[in-house]
Image (cartoon, grey):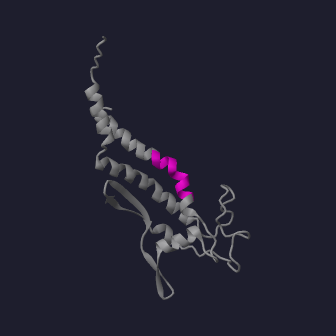
Amino acid sequence: MAKLSVDGLDGLILSLEEVAAIPDDVVNKMLEAEAQIVAPAIREEANKLGMYSGYGTEDGNFRNTSDTNTLPGQVRSYSTGKLARSVKIGKMKVKGAQRQKYVYFAGSRKRGKQRVKNSEIAFLNEYGTRTINARNFVFVAISKVTDQAVKASAAVYDKWLKEKGL
């Protein structure tokens, strides 16, 4: 009968257990790295919500107010930039074993006699209504930077692995 001997197997098992149990501070840094890329992208796309001549023709994104994408009687841009400036990165939320980092629209503004949340304005711009054309700026922004955000998160994770010698 053959005898099998393996050196270093205990070390490998310990290393794999360490990788499986990523420390909370590393997860926090990974989520923060992703948020630092996503938030500016959303701000940039939110700035494009107004009426810009020629916007969208170079990248195939026709969210501008033009002859084919306008409301009857709409002749000017109503964009003030407040929505773009309201994009914020929230604090870390911990729910059980999950960690979450929100990118959200903070604050509100006065519309007539009422106050309207910037998140509501963003929702209406994103999905539209019967009288407002949908301009999916959040979806477009996230689509553009998904790979960059994942790479930033992976870089934080790789740095932690290298510190562990793995």
Q: Quadrant of the C terminus?
A: top left
Q: Position of residue 13 (x, y in %)?
A: 29, 31
Q: Compared with residue 15, is residue 50 higher up or lower down, i.e. above or below?
A: below
Question: Seen from this angle, which residue lies furthest right?
Answer: 67
**Picture quadrant of residue 89:** bottom left
Question: Seen from this angle, which residue lies furthest front?
Answer: 1
Left/right placement of residue 136 relative to residue 15 reads: right
Number of numbered tags placed on the structure image? 0
Q: Position of residue 110 (x, y in %)?
A: 47, 82
Main SS, magenta region, reads helix
Q: Residue 81, can we see it? A: no
For image coordinates 49% across by 47% down, the residue present is 148
Q: Compared with residue 76, is residue 42 higher up or lower down, i.e. above or below?
A: above
- Stretch in magenta: 140-150
Q: Position of residue 30 (x, y in %)?
A: 37, 49
Q: Is residue 47 magenta?
A: no
Q: Quadrant of the N terminus?
A: top left
For image coordinates 30% across by 29% down, the residue present is 12
Q: Residue 162, can we see it? A: yes
Q: Compared with residue 142, is residue 154 higher up or lower down, i.e. above or below?
A: above
Q: Is residue 143 magenta?
A: yes
Q: Position of residue 72 (x, y in %)?
A: 71, 79
